[in-house]
Image (cartoon, rainbow, N blue to C red):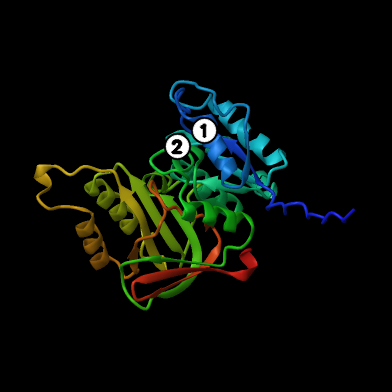
Amino acid sequence: MPKQPVQSPPSAGPAPVPIYLISPSSAVPSDAPIEASLARLRDAGFAPVLDPAALRTAQRFAGSDAVRAAAFARAAAQPAGAVMITRGGYGLTRLLPSLDFRALARARKAWIGYSDFTAFQLAMLARARAVTWSGPALLDDFAPGTEAVPDETTVGALHDALAGRLEIVGFRASGPAGVDVRGTLWGGNLTVLCSLIGTPWFPKVKGGILFLEDVGEHPYRIERMLTQLLHAGVLDAQGAVLLGHVNRYRLVERDAGFDMPGVIRRLRTLTRTPIITGLPMGHASPKLTLPHGATVGLATEGRTAYLVLDEHEH
């Protein structure tokens, strides 16, 4: 009887990356596609675990302040190395006085989020000099929508960050040529960042690379906040400023041509700090996963900007 060929078992793909999900800000709506979003996160190569309080509701928040603060302690104690928010909204600044940032930093988790999560990221940098990750949120980036699958760049950047493969990212940019600076990468949502100026949770960064994004804010409000950063000396103290998505606002007739491009042009005349636009970060896709609080290099070459992570930051 002829000998049957031995078939090799199919090669297993990489193990899914565990991610623990918390809701530290606004409540998850009752009709939010949580299960479908978790399924898409699994299909993207992750193993999500939902915090037991993630779907709580108290007024507009995802549970009381105490409930939401306790989720950080649970996230720090559980085995997954990455912690991601389900959504942003509003509520994290209420928790800052009750969080032990040094203890959360000692947990050595990759804390991932953006928008309202900016408050936590700035506080972790200010109080513990800890690196966190500005990146996607479950319902913003993995919920079913017009795309059949989540954005490839968003998913790939998240995988690279969590696997320690993040070395260099490039993106199409607009701004001064020949920029070559190195410093602390920090920032996030412009509204949240400005709300912390003068508080113990606002980091004092000199020579840094400040990145900013915002959503639903009219350009005059964006200009007012950027002017606040200018008058507070924050912009002039940086090596460069990166602007991400500033979107979902509506102009009115009385604006008479006033819009974001004009805001940026004016800002460039008021500060010596290079202002570079085009960073894929904010309330749109694609969305990079960026090491908030890490030392990076920034260089511009033609219409492309590059962020280079220092080797010791991996």
| Residue positioned most to the bottom | 178
Cα separation between marks 2 and 1 = 7 Å
Measuring from the top left, give residue 5's x and y in whole percent: 82, 56
176 or 283: nearer the viewer:
283
Measuring from the top left, give residue 241's x and y in whole percent: 38, 63
Residue located at (15% from left, 52% from top):
258
74 or 228: nearer the viewer:
74
Name the side, left or right, on which 148 lies relative to 64: left
Q: Read off the residue under disc 1.
A: 36
Q: How many marks?
A: 2
Name the side, left or right, on which 208 lies relative to 191: right
292 or 308: nearer the viewer:
308
| Residue positioned most to the front | 1
| Residue positioned most to the right | 1
Q: Secondary structure at mark 2?
A: loop
Measuring from the top left, give residue 146's x and y in whole percent: 38, 41
Q: Secondary structure at mark 1?
A: helix
Q: Are marks 2 and 1 in contact (CB under 8 Å)?
A: yes
Residue located at (33% from left, 65% from top):
275
Q: Amino acid at mark 2?
A: Pro
Q: Read off the residue under disc 2.
A: 144
Residue located at (26% from left, 66% from top):
268
Name the side, left or right, on which 10 lies relative to 133: right
Q: Earlier in the sequence, mark 2 or mark 1?
A: 1
Q: Is residue 268 above or below residue 73?
A: below
Q: Residues within 10 Å of mark 1 (few under 14, many from 20)?
A: some
Measuring from the top left, give residue 34's x and y in whole percent: 52, 30
Q: Amino acid at mark 1?
A: Ala
**Quadrant for the C terminus in the image:** bottom right
252 or 93: nearer the viewer:
252
